[in-house]
Image (cartoon, rainbow, N blue to C red):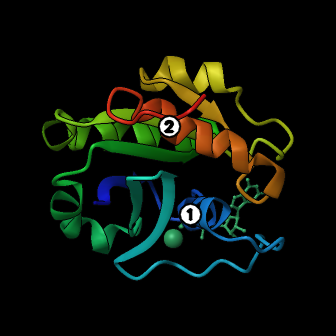
Amino acid sequence: MTRYVKVALMGSGYAGKSTLIKLLTDNTAKLEVNYKPTPGMDCGTITLDDTTKVSLVEMGGQTHFEFMWPDLLRGSRLVVVVTESTPKAVLKTRQLLHKYKDQLSNAQLVAVANKQDIPGSMKPESVQDLLGIPTYGMVAIDPKQKLTGYKMIVSGLRDMVSIAA
Ligand SMILES: Nc1nc2c(ncn2[C@@H]2O[C@H](COP(=O)(O)OP(=O)(O)O)[C@@H](O)[C@H]2O)c(=O)[nH]1
Ligand SMILES: [Mg+2]
């Protein structure tokens, strides 16, 4: 029987959540598209092993969709917090983490310091210092980063999936 593990992606609009889902679930080479805000939520599935699939659920980042967040967070085993790697965006992300800390208390948390290709980006270590959760540097528009993204999900779920290493 296949079990589905729910992983939620949260973060401000424009952080790169939809692109990250595409990176992990599509086989297309073209990941860079014109920005289209996600209405409410978006979803993709990845297969971890014979019996485990991961449902990636994007929480629409625009403020007027935030009312849906508590529902989308419910039952999420892992929450991936996606942020742009600028001081302003990271501080905003820190506020979001604080605001939803009660709903996040039962989930594993990892952060993605996205858009590392943009010159002057904050290093993942600095982002991690500010957010206080394990942080992975990422360029979600780069198909070569697919493995990095995959590893991040696997390490976040490590205690509940058995992957042939
Ligand atoms: N330069 C750069 N742009 C990115 C990266 N990831 C996403 N983007 C772009 O940022 C914009 C917002 O991305 P999107 O995934 O829609 O953000 P979301 O609102 O969090 O779902 C899009 O135009 C993407 O092509 C990245 O790693 N580097
Ligand atoms: Mg989106």
Image side of residue 40 versus residue 48, left or right: left
| Nearer-N-terminus badge (1/2) | 1
**Whether residue 30 can be seen here:** yes
Please say if 27 is above or below 91: below
SS for dot 1: helix
Task: Specify the label residue 95 is tagged with.
Answer: none
* Residue at the image position 35 percent from the left and 54 percent from the top: 8
**Viewer-closest of 78 and 39:** 78
SS for dot 2: helix
Residue 130 at what x, y percent from top left?
Answer: 48, 22
Residue 36 at what x, y percent from top left?
Answer: 59, 82
The quadrant in which the N terminus is found is bottom left
Q: Which residue is mark 2?
A: 154
Which quarter holds ligand 1?
bottom right
Task: Specify the label residue 21 is tagged with.
Answer: 1
Residue 50 at what x, y percent from top left?
Answer: 45, 52
Q: Is mark 1 within 8 Å of ligand 1?
A: yes
* Residue at the image position 50 percent from the left and 37 percent from the top: 154
* Residue at the image position 27 percent from the left and 43 percent from the top: 77
Q: Nearer the viewer, mark 1 or mark 2?
A: 2
Image side of residue 108 versus residue 35, left or right: left
* Residue at the image position 76 percent from the left and 36 percent from the top: 121
Please say if 44 is above or below 165: below
User: 10 Å neighbourhood of mark 2: few (<14), some, or many (≥20)?
Assistant: some
- Kind of residue sitting beneath label 2: Val
The quadrant in which the C terminus is found is top right
**Viewer-closest of 158 and 52:** 52
- In which quadrant of the rendered view does residue 105 lie? top left
